Image (cartoon, rainbow, N blue to C red):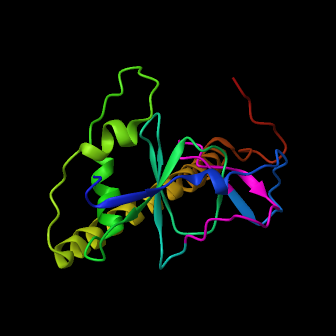
Amino acid sequence: MGEVLEYDQPNQYCVTSKEFDKSYPTPVLTAGKTFILGYTNEKDNIYQASKSSPVIIFDDFTTATQWVDFPFKVKSSAMKILLPKDPTINIRFIFFCMQTIPYNIGGEHARQWISRYSQIKIPIPPLEIQQEIVKILDQFLALTTDLQAGIPAEIKARKKQYEYYREKLLTFKPLNPNKEVKKC
């Protein structure tokens, strides 16, 4: 990995405030599952990632990774900001490759990028092939995301449908307008 990616130590991008608020403009990130810890109103030392200049953030202790294509600050310096060394490297391709690497840190509390992770070798196809792989994987990712987002809505809709039909099927009109229906 170290042959194709360089890293930026994020010390200068660390948030100093402990006050986060959703109304603030700049996300504060971690490479872990939480990803966006909150938002800050700090204006200085914001890392300027963008759609045209994305980065991978790498948790130096857990090896978790996140794709970032928007400006951000970080909570901790215990991560690396990874960038391609060469324009013939599609960083999104590398990000997808990183998702497939089984890596056991074995309870060791040590920085992983320099000591181990950067030593891992991955095959790099020509740029056109990288781009085609990324296109296919992005399509699957979008489909999966859409399905995951749609499942709760679908469950809610089916529940309402069930309640509607349950009420229709189990609500009886009196056979005789003057008599009540006996309920068991």
Of helix, strand and loop, which mostly describes the magenta segment?
loop
In the displayed structure, would residue 87 be above or below residue 27?
below
Is residue 34 highlighted in magenta?
A: yes
Residue positioned 80% across, 61% down in the render: 42
- Residue 52 at x, y percent in the picture: 47, 79
Residue that extends furthest to the top in the rendered view of this protein: 107
Is 34 or 150 nearer to us in this picture? Answer: 34
Q: Quadrant of residue 120?
A: top left
| Nearest to the observer: residue 55 or residue 146 | 55
Task: Indicate yes or no whether the magenta region holds residue 19.
Answer: no
Quadrant location of the C terminus in the rendered image:
top right
Residue located 41% across and 20% down the image: 107
Q: How many marks?
A: 0
In this picture, residue 53 sits left or right of residue 114: right
Q: Nearer the viewer, residue 158 or 50?
A: 50
Residue at image point 48% right, 75% down: 53
Across and down, in percent, residue 50 comes to 54, 74
* Residue 163, horizontal then vertical, whole percent: 64, 46
Residue 18 in the image: above or below residue 25: above
Magenta range: 28-49
Q: Is residue 36 left or right of residue 108?
A: right
Look at the picture and state if 29 lies above or below 55. above
Of 174 and 61, which appears nearest the observer? Answer: 61
Whether residue 74 sits left or right of residue 181 in the image: it is left
